[in-house]
Amino acid sequence: MKQKIGFLFADSMEFKPFSEIALADGGSFLSKRPMNVIRYETENAEIIAVESGLGKVNAAFAATLLIVDHQVDAVLNAGLSGAIQHLHKGDVVAGTSYVECDFDISPLGFPAGEKPDGTGVHAASDKLLAAATSIEGVSPARLGTGDFFLADPVKKEEYRKQFDIEAFDMETAALATVCDRLETPFLAIRKISDDAGDVASDSYLEMNALAETALSEVLLDLVSRL
């Protein structure tokens, strides 16, 4: 029996390359509301891919849909991220850990990023991470998330010191949280589009507009190794 894997892309230009690959090779739309959902079969997997929309709420909703309604065995995410430290534009990374940098109830005595139940940093699936980092050009990195586009050098430095993250995005920690609660393996593959600084938006928009197939190809390669 084939494994069933969920793919999640937040942005339409991130979803577009995968949809073109899948539809050209026998895939089909399962639905277009409340979000685009495509079913695609490979040699060893049935893939259910969704276009979630940007941000933590959309990501969490889409992950729940994949796990509860489609009963996927694992969730994989791909998208663009801003570099916080050690990384450069064009690098492709697999997230080893995920933290919600904008979750903060420190006035109540909790460390920033930590919830009342003690959860804060979520770890990637060891199996998925091993498969991803066996792909040439994919390196491990610690990821942070917030519900905003980071283009502030001061905030960037704050998150580097506070969380020691290497890249920042708007979805991955929300996805990791849902997957942990629903006991589903998770991994994010992210390509660095900008430096999360003053000119981050221009750099991100430039790369996003390319609608490159690289991230979709990495996800498909990863699945073939499972």
Image (cartoon, helix red, strand yellow):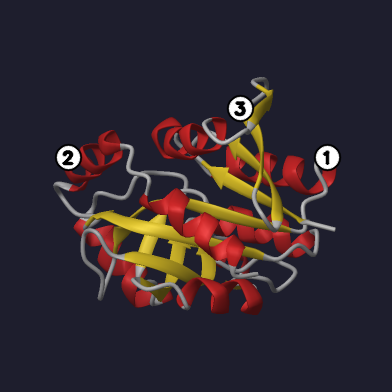
Q: Earlier in the sequence, mark 1 or mark 2?
A: 1
Pointer 3 residue: 36
In this view, 64 is above or below 187 = above
Tell me which amino acid carries mark 1: Asp
Q: Quadrant of the N terminus?
A: bottom right
In this view, 90 is above or below 59 = below
Left or right of 87 in this view: 33? right
Q: Are marks 1 and 2 in contact (CB under 8 Å)?
A: no
Q: Residue 69 bears which disc, if any?
A: 1
Kindly identify the residue that appears in the image at 17 percent across and 40 percent down: 202
Q: Residue 189 bears which disc, if any?
A: none
| C-alpha separation, residue under disc 2 versus residue under disc 3 | 27 Å
- Name the foreground residue: 222 vs 162: 222
Q: Residue 202 bears which disc, if any?
A: 2
Left or right of 148 in this view: 43? right
Coordinates of residue 38 in the picture (x, y in percent) = 64, 33
